[in-house]
Amino acid sequence: MIYLDHQASSPLLPKVLDAMLPYLTEEHANPHSDDHAAGWRAADAIAQAREKIAGRLGADAGEVIFTSGATEANNLAILGLCCEPVPRNRILVGAIEHKSVLAPARALSERGFKVITLPVDASGIVDLEALSRLLDDRVLLVSVQLVNNEIGAVQPVDRIAAMAHAVGALVHCDAAQALAWRAIDVNALGIDLLSLSGHKTGGPKGVGALYARHDVRVQLRPLIFGGEQEGGLRAGTLPTPLCVGLGVACASEPDDSAVRAWQGRRDSLRDFLRAHEPNMVIHGPVVGRHPGNLNVGFPGVDADQIIAQLQPDIAVSRGSACTSGIPEPSHVLRAIGLDAVACAEAVRISLGPLTTEQELERTAAAFARALLAARAEGRIAVA
Ligand code: PLP
């Protein structure tokens, strides 16, 4: 199979697996057991992983809280900050945020907070003029992702943070889709809270982290109660192999030339597809998007039909795996102005850094066959 769904989940890097293996096979101790050397070794491995993650972000180890993924990190950032009634009760969230940001924000609107959606332009970039109009001393938190999972749009988080800080608001950034390919320095970007996911960046599934600046961390309240793990902010035994894997996945900065090559292959695929199908439309930003992201539509053919025709040889998707099965059109595509028909036609193709040119040529040919077959079949469903 040619796997082109890296934004849903990326393959585990061999070096990550190697680092995890001892903690899956030989080192069984609970990392919170401080009565014996095996427990100390597990605790030490977690401490090193925490250091690596913090180092990658330009943060202190004490500012990193392990979670089960970016979903939990987003929930902890938003609900954990807004547990108690506070004088500031407005939350601003980007219109194309992941559901794991939108849903906790929506939950807050039932608890007396006013949640306001920040509009985006046709490329998916937050409208900074609208943000400026909405920012005042009633705003507690602005939550804007670094990179979008469906259309690859990259937000100007540093500018957003500077604007938010000017009125005393805090900034949360969901960086789940950014870590695999770009540097993230929380201080340079001005981010107060930042969410990470292991499996979007060559790490394991089931682990992530929330960075919370020291002075913001003390304002957070836990969502999960039990033991005193993670300084009382997140009860539960830490999964040593997963934390070690996340540490290794985060450890090194992406190499610029490899990222440019990745983007170049994505552009080759776009050109191959367009050569077969000149009517193809591209959704999302023209430049500056995630290097592996392509979101395209073939007028007159539903994405479901194409994707089904490509099975079992090629894995692409309709969009976010977290919204698959939801019959409504993607809120991301809607927010950038697509109608229901164009949303139903959109296919997300997400390449990994090691996807080869040969795989892309085969993919383009398979798309051409799938489109022919889908057209012969006739349109089956329009959302
Ligand atoms: N945020 C973004 C932008 C994502 O793309 C995803 C996963 O699709 C998540 C959050 C959720 O991450 P996790 O699977 O680690 O909970």
Image: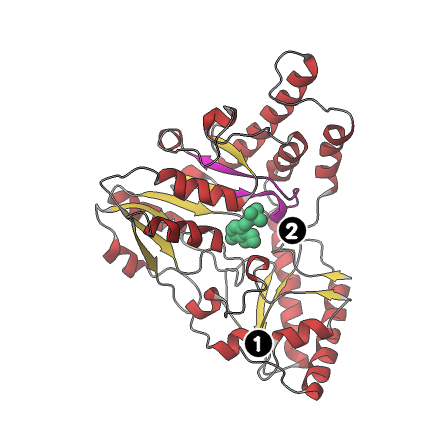
Residue at (72, 24) in percent of width and height:
28
User: In this figure, which colouring scheme has been used for the structure?
Assistant: secondary structure
Mark whose residue sits in front, 2 or 1: 1
In the image, what residue type sits under mark 1?
Glu
Left or right? Give the position of 127 relative to 240.
left
* Residue 72, horizontal then vertical, whole percent: 51, 43
- Nearer to me, 362 or 50: 50
Q: Is residue 117 above or below residue 309?
A: above
Residue placed under numbered mark 1 in the picture: 345
Tell whether 329 sits left or right of 245. Answer: left
Query: Left or right: where does residue 77 sit relative to residue 68?
Result: left
Q: Secondary structure at mark 2?
A: helix
Residue 318: x %, y % from top left: 60, 67
> Decide: marks 2, 1 in contact (CB < 8 A)?
no
Q: Quadrant of residue 121?
A: bottom left
Q: Position of residue 262 (x, y in %)?
A: 64, 57
Question: How many marks on residues?
Answer: 2
Label 2 vs 1, first from the N-terminus: 2
- Say what secondary structure mark 1 lies in: helix
Relative height, residue 105 to residue 209 (above, below) = below
**Residue 112 shown left or right of residue 351 in the figure:** left
The residue where tag 2 is placed is 258
Q: Label 2 to label 1, Cα distance in Å?
A: 31 Å
Q: Was residue 98 drawn as part of the magenta stretch in this picture? A: no
The kind of residue on which mark 2 rests is Ala
Q: Nearer the viewer, residue 23 or 200?
A: 23
